[in-house]
Image (cartoon, rainbow, N blue to C red):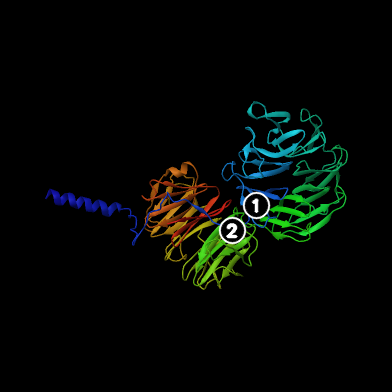
Amino acid sequence: MKSISLFSIVLIALSLFGCESSPPVSPGTFSPFDTSIPWQHVNGPPGGQILSAAISGTNMFAGTNTGVFRSTNSGANWTAASSGLRSYSWTSRLVAYRDTIFTISSSGVYRSTNNGGSWSQLGSLFYSASAISVSSLGVFAGTGNGVYVYSDSNGGTWNPTGLLYIPVTVLAVSGTNLFAGTSGYGCLRSTDGGSTWAIANSGLTNSYVSALAIVGSTILASVSSGVFRSTDSGSHWNRSNNPSSYSSCLAVDSGRVFSGGNGTIEMSSDEGVTWNSLGSVSTNATILSIAANGNEILAGTDAGAFVSTDNGSHWSDANSGLANAQVAGFTFSGTNLVVSVQNQGILVSSDQGSTWQKTNITSGYGGSFATSGNFLFAGTGNGLFRSSDNGRSWVATSGIGPSSNITRLIGDDSHLYVSTYDHLFLSLDNGSSWKDVTPPIQNASINRLALSGEYVFAGGYNGFYRSSDFGTTWSDVKLGIPGVQITVLVYGRGTLVASSYPYVSGIYLSYDNGTTWHTSNPQILQYSSPTDFAFHGPDIIAATYEEVYVSRDEGITWTSTALRTTGLNKIEIDGNDLYVGSYYTGLWRHPL
């Protein structure tokens, strides 16, 4: 009787309090993620931000947010030239001086004496450098705390000049005069190698100087309102006749000065008095850097590299081998790898990234894809687009409400959900018509969606909601944290996984469509927040901003997969391969 009574008590307790569901069992064969296999850097999509440019002899150099690339054939193709630089460090300035190339990296100032074959660091500069000048006066670095000069003595040291506590954006040398363009103080000049400095910005209409150039006896300065000229060593400035209202960079070659701005480059052969347009380099890009040598001009933009070999009469993109594209999102459709690239639009590869083709979406930002029925959909900052040929061509859709900025897509065979910042829409006919199914939440800020049969999950900055009837009615999902912001939301193999801000309770997993939750506080949150999840058998794979991890115990412990880069933002599995996209270093692949 006692045993029967005890059994009854247990049954009553279970009926009152319930029991959290268990992890689903993955059927079929499964090979665990092998962390010993190295990652492969996918050959593209090509392009990316070209922060700096230089030409030395027959070599072109492109400084990117992942290091230095070199071309020996006028930009026809590029190879990495970052040996000695810290892995995937940005290189914001390149300077060619005689037979030496200098660069500013995120980890310091470097030089190469073998055309980028290897780099050696110049001492240890305490402050992050943003400008560099190399001449007979020496090697000078501009920082957020003034100007420093390099000395080879004592193993290589950086010594402060007389200009301190002022943020320096650019440096230039004219004879014995050293000029510093600053953020907030205009232009300053030193006539004694940097020991003393004087303000030299009379006539400049803006105190932020983004570029300086010396051509002949004239110094040119670029500010937000245009290019200014000084013929008296910076004592007085007058606005140039440069027709562009914006110039982000200046470059000089053989008495010519080049100015770059919103997709165009202008050239002056009379020290900036008159200018001629060299035509449109790219209609979708901003010029970030210029280098010239004779008839060759290299233009670095936020959408890749462009080269002219006829003094600017014609331009062609020169991105082959530049594997640092800003991947905003990607997916697989049929046999195609479809990728959205910042400032380049949507590109497609049918051979796992070996070669790429452009589509008719050639600009804008879009990071979300979804399949519904026989169509592939892409959400962009310019609206929603639909493809019937696996991403090769696109047609705009309409009728999704007041906002065209698409934040997230999710779909299945018969349902397509599209979120904007303040609305959620449902289409049952592949985008031909729409129904507003926005959760009853003020300023919804929906940017995360997940779908599990009739269950729809919507999260964002102002809460987390669930619908069990395709979005007709909604209920608030409680994760135990007030004011939670959902940052990642993914459904797969019967599991809903979420991450949130603040990250005090780590990663959340639900095996019953959000009714109950299992929480863990994995060690990956100590280093970087999750950006995406994927499922491979019983494995959960997590991308963080700088690394990829795998967990074999439902998120309790995590193992690094040895991919360490930056800007990781998306995971997809295609057949026997795992792909990860980066906002700075393109695409990576790992066999499963």
Whether residue 546 can be seen here: yes
Alpha carbon separation for disc pair 1 and 2: 13 Å
Image quadrant in which you'd find residue 276: bottom right
- Disc 1 marks which residue? 49
Query: For this rendering, which residue is in front, 350 or 201?
Result: 350
- Disc 2 marks which residue? 45
Q: Which mark is residue 445?
A: none
Image coordinates of residue 127 in percent, x first then y, are 64, 34
Q: Are marks 1 and 2 in contact (CB under 8 Å)?
A: no
397 relative position to 18: left or right: right
Label 1 environment density (alpha carbons within 10 Å; few <14, some 14–19, many ≥20): many
Image quadrant in which you'd find residue 91: top right
Image coordinates of residue 548 in percent, x first then y, are 47, 49
> From what the image shows, is residue 68 above or below residue 470?
above
Q: Secondary structure at mark 2?
A: loop
Query: For this rendering, which residue is in front, 523 or 51?
Result: 51
> From what the image shows, is residue 201 above or below residue 1?
above
Residue at 87% from the left image edge and 49% from the top image edge:
270
Label 2 environment density (alpha carbons within 10 Å; few <14, some 14–19, many ≥20): many
Amino acid identity at mark 2:
Pro
Image coordinates of residue 351 in percent, x first then y, are 53, 64
> From what the image shows, is residue 531 above or below residue 120?
below
Image coordinates of residue 111 in percent, x first then y, are 66, 39
Which quarter of the image is occupied by the C terminus? bottom left
Q: Secondary structure at mark 1?
A: loop
Q: For the view shown, which residue lies furthest in the left direction? A: 1
Image quadrant in which you'd find residue 444: bottom right
User: Closer to the observer: label 1 or label 2?
Assistant: 2
Amino acid identity at mark 1:
Gln
Whether residue 397 can be seen here: no
171 relative position to 445: left or right: right
